[in-house]
Image (cartoon, rainbow, N blue to C red):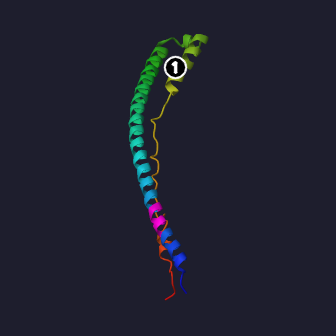
């Protein structure tokens, strides 16, 4: 058995188009991966800058909490138990309980075409039985 000349021509054309499609797909994946990597690097730099600000915020909050706690503790027990003292205690505890975490993100996955070669298996099909 054998493919007809017309079918063999179609087969060869499809193999060629499959090669071209695989190549174009690979180029597109490479372009995508490069763009994603560049954008990721820019994003990571912004995350680091943001984390620096977060560190400053945390340090400020800790210093304020410590100062407010010292100021509160220096007051008389009577004042601490008063309405004004209780309001102040809530303020102190608000500052003491404040926390914020550094930002952290996972890098996006690259496109890995793996076995996505369009024409290879098709190209291996026999065109005759001899």
Magenta-drawn stretch, dominant element (helix, strand or loop): helix
Residue drawn at the location 53% of the way across and 84% of the way down: 2
Q: Nearer the viewer, residue 120 or 56?
A: 120
Where's residue 49, x and y in %? Answer: 39, 32
- Per the image, the residue denoted by label 1 is 92
Q: Which residues are magenta?
A: 15-21
Residue 58 colored in magenta in the image:
no
Is disc 1 placed on a helix, strand or loop?
Answer: helix
Specify the quadrant of the image occupied by residue 46: top left
Where's residue 106, x and y in %? Answer: 46, 46
Where's residue 100, x and y in %? Answer: 48, 31
Q: Going by the picture, which residue comes out furthest to the front?
A: 6
Q: Is residue 85 above or below residue 26?
A: above
Res 115 visible: no
Q: Is residue 53 left or right of residue 10?
A: left
Where's residue 47, x and y in %? Answer: 42, 35
């Amino acid at each position: 058995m054998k493919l007809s000349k017309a079918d063999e021509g179609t087969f060869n054309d499809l193999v060629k188009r499959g090669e071209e499609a695989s190549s174009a797909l690979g180029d597109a994946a490479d372009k995508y991966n490069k763009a994603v990597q560049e954008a990721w690097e820019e994003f990571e730099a912004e995350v680091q800058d943001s984390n620096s600000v977060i560190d400053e915020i945390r340090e400020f909050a800790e210093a304020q909490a410590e100062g407010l706690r010292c100021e509160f503790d220096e007051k008389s027990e009577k004042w601490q138990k008063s309405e004004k003292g209780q309001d102040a205690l809530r303020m102190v505890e608000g500052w003491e309980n404040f926390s914020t975490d550094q930002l952290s993100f996972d890098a996006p996955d690259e496109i890995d075409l793996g076995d996505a070669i369009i024409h290879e298996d098709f190209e291996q099909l026999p065109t005759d039985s001899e």
